[in-house]
Amino acid sequence: MDSRDKVLDKYSSKIYKNRKEHVIEIEGGEPQVIAADTRAIPGIMTNRGCCYAGCKGVVIGPLKDVVNIVHGPIGCAYYTWGTRRNKAKGDENTKDFTQYSFSTDMQETDIVFGGEKKLRQAIKEAVEIFNPECIMISSTCPVGLIGDDIHAVAAESEKLYGIKVLAFSCEGYKGVSQSGGHHIANNGLMKYIIGTGDAEPQKYSVNLLGEYNIGGDGWEVERILKRIGYNVVSVMTGDGSYDHLKNAHTADLNLVQCHRSINYIAEMMKTKYGMDWIKVNFIGVDGIKKSLMDIALYFDDPELLARTEAVIAEEIGEIEEAMSYYKSKLDGKKAAVYVGGSRTHHYINLLKSLGVEVILAGYEFGHRDDYEGRDVIPTIKMDADSKNIESITVTKDEANYKTFHTPEKLEALKAAGVPLEKYDGLWSDISEGAIITDDFNHFETEEFLKLLKPDIFFSGIKDKFIIQKSGVPSRQLHSYDYSGPYAGFRGALNFAKDITMATYTPVWNMVQAPWKSEPTLVGSLGGME
Ligand code: CFM
């Protein structure tokens, strides 16, 4: 029995039938079909988050000049406050509210008598105290259940205060994971914000999509892009702002880092404004090199291309020696990588360049295209859960529509390997024999750890403790624990250093639970000690 069967064999037949479609072994370089983006099994400890987490926590929360009001119980606001480490800085032109947590703090009486009054009051206070240009309201589960009309409150507040007020019906229970929340957030930003600014277009301008500035990743990417000579019009959404997002339509090209959370905006901007998008990856030296060259090829300017090559050479020169030292320490190690919907793939080239092989991997909530590539999208069957998430259609904006290249030139770029509207998915880089688990759970994590014994496990806050208790070092690839940035050339070096320290400091293996060596309870039974 191989390790996959050994783990799945422990399930009841009903659960086995479900999970066998989500856990696969990569064989013979053949394209594989995986079940993804379906409901988690009730009772199983999934690592997923909810729809509200995807909308407020992931996509709209990082917009720094927006007051993000969470309409709901205080816990929902508290748990999306700071833990993701999406950094932001205000400046003389842009306010930064990301250090605050705004909530209506719903109580039982609000659930019984309705919470709209409290929401109106929260908006009034936010306007009086913070004077923002934009407020966004996110719904939590009870709001959807009792039927508060947050959209009506938003529309009325917009008139009353003369600012932008958006409402998102992203109740936690919608869809099957945080993925639905990404889509809802994308729809709102596209409908009401992108395209409302009147800035003048700049030369060599790009938007950076699906970059959330975790641990400062976005700042490192922007530093490199600016060094080469690009103008970054907006970042969606790490350290991003309403102010910049309004003018996103003026850029020449969209760069998509996290495909899962934001491909909807990239696609809609192509239809509405004619703006092309390419898939990039700024994690890992090979990934960054390829992405920077792809962007330069797109702009097709010899000077820009020369600068790109020079910056790449200089940046690599800075880290090369240290990287090869860390490679000598890490060569031959094996890793497990489990993140949400895109990072698992992004980190593979970085790990490979350090001699680390990925033997176990997966996503919490990826869709089939995140595994198998965008080509499968037309074959993905919609189910009742996916139909529950609104999919909006946009039309050509005649006034702002522009094309940068002719269709022939775009075809030539595609033929030259530039990933225009293309994403190959995790399959394209995963090693033969690797085990892939979609929507992984605590049971499978423990079992695969015992069987495959990876040297390091990249994971998140919910699973890291299981991993550490079993003696294996863990680094969080969601928040980077307390470290970062990991993106860009300098980030690659931070990463190499952190995982070398983790694998050479096997503290978790040395910790023994106290009850294993001495009794922790003392008492007497029937007169005996
Ligand atoms: Fe995109 Fe993300 Fe990810 Fe994601 Fe996330 Fe995240 Fe993630 Mo945690 S947007 S899909 S919903 S890259 S919070 S910054 S690390 S699960 S792999």
Image (cartoon, rainbow, N blue to C red):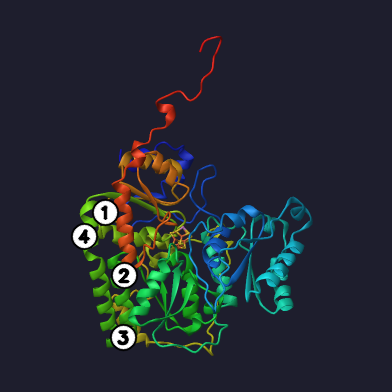
Do callouts 3 and 2 mark residues in contact (Cβ within 8 Å)? no
Residue positioned 31% across, 85% down in the render: 300
* Foreground disc of the pair 4, 2: 4
The answer to whether residue 414 is visible is: yes
Amino acid type indicated by mark 1 = Val
- Examine the image and state in which quarter residue 527 appears: top right
Q: Which mark is residue 356?
A: 1
Q: Is residue 327 left or right of residue 239?
A: left
The answer to whether residue 427 is visible is: no
- Examine the image and state in which quarter residue 52 appears: bottom right
Q: Disc 4 versus disc 2: distance between alpha carbons?
A: 17 Å
For label 2, the residue is 288
Work out whether residue 429 or residue 161 is closer to the camera in this orientation and state it.
161
Element under disc 4? helix
Mark 2 crowd level (few <14, some 14–19, many ≥20, 10 Å Cα): many
Q: Is residue 333 left or right of residue 200?
A: left
Q: Disc 3 versus disc 2: distance between alpha carbons?
A: 18 Å
* Foreground disc of the pair 3, 1: 1
For label 3, the residue is 300
* Whole-percent x, y for residue 341 in the image: 44, 59
* Whole-percent x, y for residue 154 in the image: 69, 71
Mark 1 crowd level (few <14, some 14–19, many ≥20, 10 Å Cα): many
Amino acid type indicated by mark 2 = Ile
* Foreground disc of the pair 3, 4: 4
Query: In this picture, is 406 found above or below 468?
Result: below
